[in-house]
Image (cartoon, rainbow, N blue to C red):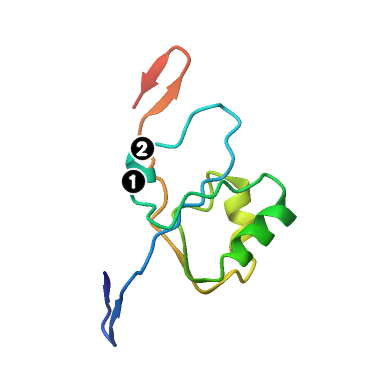
Amino acid sequence: MLLYVSSSFLSVLCLTQVIILPVARTDGKPLSPFIADWADGGVHEVSLSLSHARALVAGLDLDVLVFADLLSEPMNHYLAHSRLATVQVLGKGVTVSHYTCYAGGCAA
């Protein structure tokens, strides 16, 4: 259950299933088992083709679509501009450290 409270209303959303839609990776790293365990509705890898990705997500007929982040993956940015669910939500995103890292090490 997701509980959202604001100054004007209280909203409770009961989720019947969670579907994970990771964008296809080019670095060969697998999806974390921790994330996959949350997917009682399945894991569907999103293609790097925008038209195929839109068709896949639209075909799921989602009520709520949560984008965890829009800036780390171009596909997320483009899909967010499509109406793919009744409610589309943007998460907090990826936190950025105040350290700058490079091949020689990290500096504050």
| Secondary structure beneath label 1 | helix
- Near mark 2 (Cα within 10 A), the count class, few <14, some 14-19 or many ≥20, is few
- Residue type pointed to by label 2: Pro
For residue 27, which quarter of the picture?
A: top right
8 to the left or right of 68:
left
Residue 5, position as x, y percentages in the image: 25, 77
Residue 15, position as x, y percentages in the image: 34, 69
Residue at the far top in the pictured view:
104
| Secondary structure beneath label 2 | helix
**Residue at left 36%, top 22%?**
107
Residue 103, position as x, y percentages in the image: 48, 14
| Residues at marks 2 and 1, CA–CA distance in whole angstroms | 6 Å
- Whether pointer 2 and pointer 1 mark residues with C-beta atoms closer than 8 Å, the reply is yes
For residue 92, which quarter of the picture?
A: bottom left
**Residue at left 60%, top 48%?**
46
Residue 91, position as x, y percentages in the image: 41, 59
**Quadrant the C terminus occupies:** top left
Instruction: Identify residue for label 1.
Output: 37
**Most foreground residue, 107 or 6:** 6
